[in-house]
Image (spheres, helix red, strand yellow):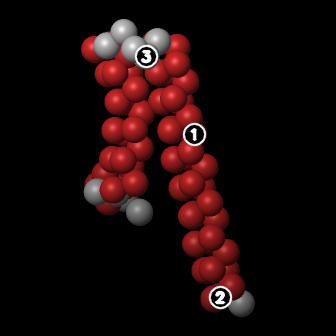
């Protein structure tokens, strides 16, 4: 999958917004502390990375089963 194709991913944009919104909320309001916002953003990014890894692993497993 090329870079432009990856930029069209709805999961990528959802993860990007999910990582950005806590930091924006911390900046614009005093309700969310910055360390908590960074922690929430990190959790979203890690979830996206592990989720994409699982999808890629399943795709690789299916392609290896199809070749066998």
Checking the image for residue 32, the label placed there is 3
User: Is 46 placed above or below 55 here?
Assistant: above
Measure how far apart labels 3 and 2 are at the Cα level.
51 Å
SS for callout 1 = helix
The residue under label 2 is 67
Which of 62 and 17 lies nearest the eye of the viewer?
Answer: 17
- x and y percentages locating residue 45 in the rendered image: 51, 38
First along the sequence among labels 3 and 2: 3
Q: Position of residue 14 (x, y in %)?
A: 36, 47
Dot 3, crowdedness within 10 Å: few (<14), some or many (≥20)?
A: some
Say which element carries label 3.
loop
Residue at horizontal 50 percent and vertical 38 percent from the top: 44
Splitting the image into 4 quarters, where does residue 39 fall?
A: top right
Q: How many marks?
A: 3
- What residue is at 40 percent from the left and 38 percent from the top? 18
Give the left or right position of residue 59, taking residue 8 as reference: right
Q: Which one is in front in this view, the residue at disc 3 or the one at disc 1?
A: 3
Disc nearer the start of the sequence (2/1): 1
- Camera-side mark, 3 or 2: 3
Left or right: 6 in relation to 60: left
Q: Nearer the viewer, residue 47 or 65?
A: 47
Quarter in which the N terminus is drawn: bottom left
**Looking at the image, which residue is at 57% across and 63% down?**
56
Q: Secondary structure at mark 2?
A: helix
Residue 46 numbered tag: 1
Q: Is residue 3 shown to the viewer in this render?
A: no
Return the x and y of residue 35 as percentages of the image width and height: 52, 14
Crowd band around label 1 with a 10 angstrom C-alpha radius: few (<14), some (14–19), many (20+): some
Residues at discs 3 and 1 in contact (Cβ within 8 Å)? no
Q: Does any portion of residue 18 appear in the rendered image?
A: yes
Q: Nearer the viewer, mark 2 or mark 1?
A: 1
**Position of residue 52 measured from the top left corner of the image (x, y, whole percent):** 54, 55
């Amino acid at each position: 999958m090329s870079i432009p194709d990856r930029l069209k991913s709805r999961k990528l944009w959802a993860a990007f917004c999910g990582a950005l919104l806590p930091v924006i909320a911390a900046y614009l309001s005093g309700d969310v502390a910055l360390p908590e916002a960074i922690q929430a953003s990190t959790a979203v990014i890690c979830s996206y990375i592990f989720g994409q890894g699982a999808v890629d692993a399943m795709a690789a497993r299916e392609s290896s089963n199809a070749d066998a």
